[in-house]
């Protein structure tokens, strides 16, 4: 049987692995290959750097697998807490994984087009850009669901006596940021430039919320001495 400590380690390590892979997959590979608003350059990049595009797709699959592991590990870690909220939190992450998987399929379709024998270059370019746009929009929709997952995870953290309220606040802040940013991207595309600025500003605290909690899980998660004492108890001891 997996202990609370082991589940904390698994979740924390998987989250850090995801962060490292995402930094390469999206931060480098996808951002290098895909040039927004410039189909010709994008398609040219994909054709001349297929190895990088294949590596990107492999990276997304590893992230997908890590997401499944995190969903299970966090479920085990919080299993003695609010059951209804716990099941909802886990279910939302699984739904996100499913949507994320659909998004990745669009990249696989792009790779098939690149490896195919389509003679009409213009038609191929339109198909490729259509699939890339679909990847972005599907992923954004999935990140809205992911935001709600983080929201309920933050509430679970608040309810836990072994987790400092700071992490609950940070997770809720990160959750609201995800929901707002990606809701605007999907439903209010006319504010795309403004939301990109907001996303740039919030990216650091959002990353700190997820990565910081991952480090907490690795360093202190599940340890019996992580029980925080109340203010009254501290006063009595002083």
Image: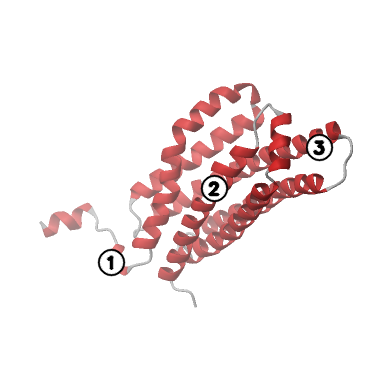
Q: Is residue 200 above or below residue 105?
A: above
Sequence-wise, which precedes: disc 2 or disc 1? 2
**Mark 1 and mark 3: Cα distance apart in space:** 56 Å
| Neighbours of disc 1 within 10 Å: few (<14), some (14-19), many (20+) | few
Percent position of residue 116, x then y: 84, 47
Q: Name the residue under label 1.
A: 225
Sequence-wise, which precedes: disc 3 or disc 2? 2
In this view, the residue in front, 10 or 120, is 120
Residue reaching furthest to the bottom: 1
Q: Mark 3 points at which residue?
A: 127
Q: Is residue 160 above or below residue 30?
A: below
Residue reaching furthest to the left: 238
| Neighbours of disc 2 within 10 Å: few (<14), some (14-19), many (20+) | some
Q: In which quarter of the image is the C terminus?
A: bottom left
Residue reaching furthest to the right: 119
Q: Is residue 56 left or right of residue 112?
A: left
**Which residue: 41% across, 39% down?**
205
Q: In this view, does 214 lie to the left or right of 85?
A: left
Q: How many numbered marks, from 0 up? A: 3
Q: Is residue 206 above or below residue 74?
A: above
Please give the label number shown on residue 24: 2
In this view, the residue in front, 50 or 111, is 50
- Colour scheme of the rendered structure: secondary structure
Percent position of residue 22, x then y: 54, 49
Q: What element carries label 2?
A: helix
Q: In this view, does 114 lie to the left or right of 35?
A: right
Cβ atoms at labels 3 and 2 below 8 Å apart: no
| Neighbours of disc 3 within 10 Å: few (<14), some (14-19), many (20+) | some
């Amino acid at each position: 049987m997996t202990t609370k400590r082991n589940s904390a380690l698994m979740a924390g390590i998987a989250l850090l692995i995801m962060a490292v892979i995402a930094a390469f997959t999206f931060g480098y590979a996808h951002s290098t290959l895909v040039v927004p608003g410039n189909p010709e350059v994008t398609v040219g990049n994909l054709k001349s750097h297929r190895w990088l595009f294949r590596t990107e797709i492999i990276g997304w699959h590893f992230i997908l697998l890590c997401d499944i592991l995190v969903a299970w590990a966090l479920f085990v870690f919080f299993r003695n807490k609010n059951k209804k909220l716990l099941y909802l939190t886990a279910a939302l992450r699984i739904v996100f994984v499913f949507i994320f998987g659909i998004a990745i399929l669009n990249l696989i379709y792009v790779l098939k087009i690149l490896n195919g024998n389509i003679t009409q270059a213009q038609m191929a370019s339109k198909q490729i850009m259509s699939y890339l746009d679909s990847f972005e929009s599907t992923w954004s929709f999935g990140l809205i669901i992911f935001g709600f997952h983080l929201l309920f995870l933050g509430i679970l953290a608040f309810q836990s006596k072994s987790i400092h309220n700071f992490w609950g606040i940070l997770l809720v802040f990160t959750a609201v940021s995800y929901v707002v940013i990606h809701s605007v991207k999907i439903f209010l595309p006319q504010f795309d430039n403004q939301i990109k600025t907001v996303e740039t500003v919030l990216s650091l605290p959002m990353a700190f919320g997820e990565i910081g909690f991952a480090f907490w899980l690795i360093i202190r998660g599940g340890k019996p001495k992580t029980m925080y004492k109340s203010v009254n108890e501290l006063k009595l001891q002083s």
